[in-house]
Image: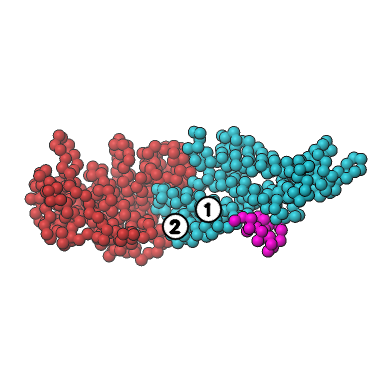
Chain colours: A cyan, B red
């Protein structure tokens, strides 16, 4: 009961931060919309996204523009766009959340330990980060997929390996500043160990920054996933918006079927911008100077 | 004796070479005693106490002939043991700039409880009761236990830090500049509070400050530190009435006296020596109007002037003469022409 109340309070705190910024509110609503879509898709999708559909007069419904029968039109292979979009949202939200969260956990820990211990630990961890910084995303995922095949887990792995690096550097910089603060010395005098100081005294002080970078990492993961899928490196068993654009592109219908590229593109753009709007709301907390603008 | 230090030195490794921040300190603190440690900024006061509590940064090297707590040398103790047995249970600290020593994201009471949890096993209810008791003792309302540090004024934060230091009733409380950065009225209140607490609990206090008036008001015994070395230790009244060391004489001149309104203050010319690579002879020799060749080459030993009164000066025997001359402004102008 206590834990529930604490959780409720924590969530309401975050809601309060986001609501202070109108853009953040819009962003949050968009994200909530896509998350709900992702959850209800199996029950509400009007058609099997892989089925070849016929219209009411029995013809194969190939490349139909949006209509009352097919709200978002159909693809070249007569598949329902709306159902495909919904299943794709599921994939995108899943990959975005999972890789965004894993990467912030890795980035934050590397940053915290690097900044707190300094010296050789710092040197080793930061040179490792530099190496990762040198790795370009596309060649990396191409190699990974050439070696192991197209699968969702390798897409997530490729994204995580690339995305954590920025958060590690930023968290390290903040930790360097915080560990000099008097309250860290006071905590040490009181007998707190290193881990307690790192997780209980320093981390809560960079929480707004962590949330900012969580939103950022999720946005980046979604773009990366869409990019990889568009180039044909996505998991063929899971629909994704980038994958739909890829199908559109190889079918050669990009000039005729506007609905085929418009809806997935709008979905990618709106979800990523929504996440950036949210991170903007956190940035105003993490960096109060922005508020006056 | 609670705490005994003999020949304690601390050096910092820097790129330019070792800096001797504390050099050959000998000091003892007895039970139920307030010892003041005074000296100008940068003379090594804070380094000295951090070396006692093992709070120095990496790169600092501590050596001592003896560093004993209640008669037992603690130098061989592992950090873990030291933290368990001595820290906070026996010696606690009110850190410098206590106002910044509270973590802004936690309630003040929780931070005091953290100090209890790290060192003693107490039920949450008992810990809470103890915090309430201490808040009451330092004059903070109990409802402030669940307030955040930003809701506190500077003086309240200072009192909260004092409460935190007293929470396990340690035998010795080290207070590093407990009144710096507070206005005079708040200073006065804090000092009165500390004195009251001491009368009630009987712990010893090591009081560090560069504010002579605070030390004069509170201490039984005063140690004067300069450039990492102890210059003179004496009972409080004796130090002010019959100082021996020329540096103490200079310090005394630099503080206004209520008996001499309108008389200009005499300051000590020059600045403290660079401690890189250590200092030969007496560290004060370059600024001392009474320095002779011996002072520049040979480190003065502690000589006992009276029971409980020691000074590290080659010319300690000529104290009377130095005292009269040091009161004259001309005496201190020598080095301007010399330099």
Q: Chain of mark 2?
A: A
Relative depth, front residue between A36 and A56: A56
Q: Chain of mark 1?
A: A
Residue A256 lies, in percent from the top left, at 78, 42
- Mark 2 crowdedness (10 Å alpha carbons): few <14, some 14-19, many ≥20: some
Marks 2/1: CA–CA distance? 14 Å
Work out whether residue A205 can be spotted.
yes
| Count of numbered tags | 2
- Whichever of callouts 2 and 1 sits on the residue coming sooner in the sequence is 2
Residue A130 lies, in percent from the top left, at 52, 57
Relative depth, front residue between B119 and A175: A175
Q: Quadrant of residue B135?
A: top left
Based on the picture, tell me whether residue B5 belongs to the magenta stretch. no
Magenta-tinted stretch:
A136-158
Where disc 2 sits, the SS reads: loop
A89 relative position to B86: left or right: right
Residue B200 lies, in percent from the top left, at 32, 45
Q: Main secondary structure of the magenta part?
A: helix
Where disc 1 sits, the SS reads: helix
A189 relative position to A208: left or right: left
Work out whether residue B123 can be spotted.
no
Based on the picture, tell me whether residue A140 belongs to the magenta stretch. yes
A208 relative position to A48: left or right: left
Residue B308 lies, in percent from the top left, at 18, 55
- Mark 1 crowdedness (10 Å alpha carbons): few <14, some 14-19, many ≥20: many
Q: Residue at x 17, y 44 (%)?
A: B267
Residue hosting label 1: A168
Residue hosting label 2: A118
């Amino acid at each position: 009961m206590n834990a529930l109340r604490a959780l409720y309070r924590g969530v309401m705190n975050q809601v309060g931060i986001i609501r202070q910024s109108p853009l953040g509110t819009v962003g949050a609503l968009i994200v909530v919309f896509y998350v709900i879509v992702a959850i209800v898709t199996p029950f509400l999708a009007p058609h099997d996204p892989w089925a070849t559909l016929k219209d009411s007069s029995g013809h194969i419904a190939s490349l139909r523009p949006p209509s009352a029968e097919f709200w978002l039109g159909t693809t070249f292979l007569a598949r329902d766009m709306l159902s495909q979009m919904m299943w794709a949202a599921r994939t995108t939200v899943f990959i975005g959340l999972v890789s965004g969260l894993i990467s912030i956990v890795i980035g934050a820990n590397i940053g915290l330990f690097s900044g707190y211990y300094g010296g050789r630990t710092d040197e080793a961890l930061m040179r490792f980060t530099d190496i990762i910084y040198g790795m370009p995303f596309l060649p990396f995922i191409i190699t990974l997929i050439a070696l192991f095949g197209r699968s969702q887990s390798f897409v997530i792995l490729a994204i995580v390996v690339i995305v954590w690096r920025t958060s590690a550097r930023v968290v390290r910089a903040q930790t360097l500043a915080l560990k000099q603060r008097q309250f860290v010395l006071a905590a040490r005098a009181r007998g707190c160990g290193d881990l307690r100081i790192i997780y209980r005294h320093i981390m809560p002080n960079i929480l707004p920054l962590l949330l900012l970078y969580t939103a950022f990492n999720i946005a980046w993961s979604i773009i990366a996933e869409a990019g990889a899928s568009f180039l044909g490196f996505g998991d063929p068993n899971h629909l994704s918006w980038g994958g739909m654009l890829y199908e559109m592109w190889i079918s050669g219908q990009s000039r005729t079927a506007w609905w085929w590229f418009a809806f997935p593109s709008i979905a990618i753009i709106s979800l990523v911008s929504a996440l950036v709007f949210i991170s903007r709301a956190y940035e105003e907390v993490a960096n109060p100077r922005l508020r006056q603008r | 004796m609670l705490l005994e230090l003999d020949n304690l030195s601390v050096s910092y490794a820097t790129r330019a070479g070792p800096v001797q921040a504390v050099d050959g300190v000998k000091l003892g603190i007895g039970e139920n005693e307030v010892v003041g440690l005074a000296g100008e900024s940068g003379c090594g006061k804070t380094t000295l106490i951090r070396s006692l509590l093992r709070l120095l940064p990496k790169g600092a090297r501590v050596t001592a002939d003896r560093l004993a707590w209640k008669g037992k040398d603690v130098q061989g103790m592992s950090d873990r043991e030291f933290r368990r047995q001595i820290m906070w249970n026996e010696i606690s600290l009110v850190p410098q700039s206590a106002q910044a020593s509270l973590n802004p994201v936690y309630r003040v009471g929780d931070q005091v409880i953290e100090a209890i949890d790290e060192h003693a096993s107490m039920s949450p209810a008992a810990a809470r009761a103890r915090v309430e008791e201490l808040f009451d003792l330092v004059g903070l309302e109990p409802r402030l236990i669940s307030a955040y540090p930003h809701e506190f004024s500077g003086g309240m934060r200072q009192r909260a830090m004092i409460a935190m230091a007293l929470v396990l009733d340690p035998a010795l409380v080290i207070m590093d500049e407990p009144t710096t950065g507070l206005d005079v009225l708040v200073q006065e209140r804090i000092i009165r509070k500390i004195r009251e607490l001491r009368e009630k609990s009987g712990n010893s206090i090591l009081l560090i400050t560069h504010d002579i008036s605070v030390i004069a008001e509170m201490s039984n015994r005063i140690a004067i530190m300069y450039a990492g070395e102890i210059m003179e230790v004496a009972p409080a009244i004796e130090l002010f009435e019959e100082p021996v060391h020329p540096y103490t004489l200079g310090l005394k001149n630099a503080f206004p006296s209520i008996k001499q309104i309108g008389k200009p203050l005499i300051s000590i010319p020059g600045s403290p020596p660079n401690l890189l690579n250590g200092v030969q002879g007496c560290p004060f020799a370059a600024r001392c109007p009474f320095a002779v060749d011996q002072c520049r080459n040979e480190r003065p030993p502690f000589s006992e002037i009276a029971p409980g009164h020691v000074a590290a000066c080659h010319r300690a025997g000529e104290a009377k003469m130095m005292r009269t001359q040091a009161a004259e402004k001309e005496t201190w102008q020598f080095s301007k022409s010399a330099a």
